Amino acid sequence: MRTKIATSLIAATLSTVCLPAAAQSPAPAAPATAAVPQDPVIAMRQHWLDGDINSFNFRNSAQIFETRTVAKGDAVWPLLAGPAATMPADYDGWARRTFTNALMVIHDGKVVFEDYRNRTTPTDRFISFSMAKTITALLVGLAIEDGKIASIDDPVSKYVPELKGGGYEGVSIRHVLQMRSGVAYEERYDFGANPSLAAQIHMNAIVANTERFADRARTIGRAAAPGSRFNYATLDTAVLGWVLERATGERLAPYMSRRLWQPMGAESDGFFIADGPEGVGRELSGMGYNARLRDFGRIGLMLLNKGRVEGRQVIPASWVEQATTMVPFAPNAAKPTRDAYGYQIWKLDAEPGAYSAIGLAGQFIYVHPASNTVIVKLSHFPNPEPAGVVDETIKGFHAIIAGLKK
């Protein structure tokens, strides 16, 4: 999710965007000395992305939001240590310039470098932001293997009838996996007197918890024919999460625990941030997963291994192959190498066969099959994103890989 939030504007618009209708009605006059302060939880959420404190916030989301636990199992996939990698000479400067919180390099199946910065630790659980989209796509593959989803060419409304009659009618699961739903959604977060739809959803579902992220999918209109164009939309992934719930008959967190997190051998519980009213909200499938650095590394290594973990096929190899097959689109001039997309996964650069899960503020699981390497970088980019920081991040990845080849 690409969020550009001006905190002062959020605070100014909270009463008109977030609060339920009842809360906007005139309240009885109170004594002048009894002014009600802002809800401190809402205030914390408003400041979640602030650049001066987000390094801390991004590893403490459980203290800020409603959550849903994804339980680990008893068996842990050991990440063995390999020969220590020689990092580029300017690694420390690069890590600082690209706002690194934690970084891991896995080469030839072994951890060759692991770095925790800014007082982060191996037990911290970091927000993935939109790397969660890639995880959601893996769960779709598992639901197909389980026979819960018959085909990705099924319309999403087959599983979520509430989507009939709106922009998502006639849209297939494949379309939303590829961000080609055609619905009239812009990943644009404009706050103020006339907030954009994405801004309204963010404020209502994530900050104030007065609605669910996918609720607007029932009434949103259509901007293009399904499948006709690429349009990055977190709402598409929210729909995927809804489809998974209905198809499997389970909430996302327990399904993920049973079918992915435990079979993968995660070392720690993960958790989703939840939307909607307390206790009933839905896991934020498009941006809300949190886990340890090493468990994100396990996801990358499993993808590199075509879905295998210690000789066991956890994700069907055919699904990994489909998910990481890039479908080209017309690139944004500011990001010319990011010109193709798979199933909720990006082509990040021009390296043949390389792909990446990417999240807001510099979260990356970068898989480079040609060198048998996975790099996980968890960052705290300020908002708005500094010019050139992603390009410098990618150059750093290339320099690390070049050093491994020596």
Image (cartoon, rainbow, N blue to C red):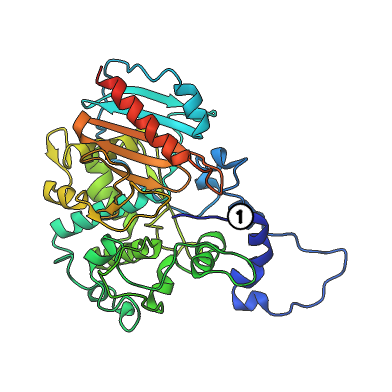
Looking at the picture, how far across and down is residue 369, in whole percent?
Answer: 20, 35
To which quarter of the image does residue 39 belong? bottom right
Q: Against 403, is 219 above or below?
A: below
Q: Amino acid at mark 1?
A: Gln
- 143 left or right, relative to 231: left
Position of the C terminus, as image quadrant, is top left
Q: What residue occupies the far bottom of the structure in this picture? A: 165
- 362 left or right, relative to 43: left
Q: Which residue sits at x=48%, y=33%?
A: 101
Q: What residue occupies the far front of the structure in this picture? A: 333
Q: Nearer the viewer, residue 14 or 369?
A: 369
- 23 left or right, relative to 388: right
Q: Circle 1 — which element?
A: helix
Q: Against 326, is 28 above or below?
A: below
To which quarter of the image does residue 126 belong? top left
Position of the N terminus, as image quadrant, is bottom left
Q: Which residue sits at x=37%, y=57%?
A: 285
Q: Which residue sits at x=34%, y=78%?
A: 167
Q: Which residue is mark 1?
A: 46
Looking at the picture, how far across and down is residue 331, in whole percent?
Answer: 34, 55
Q: Nearer the viewer, residue 151 or 1?
A: 1
Looking at the picture, how far across and down is residue 351, in whole percent?
Answer: 26, 38
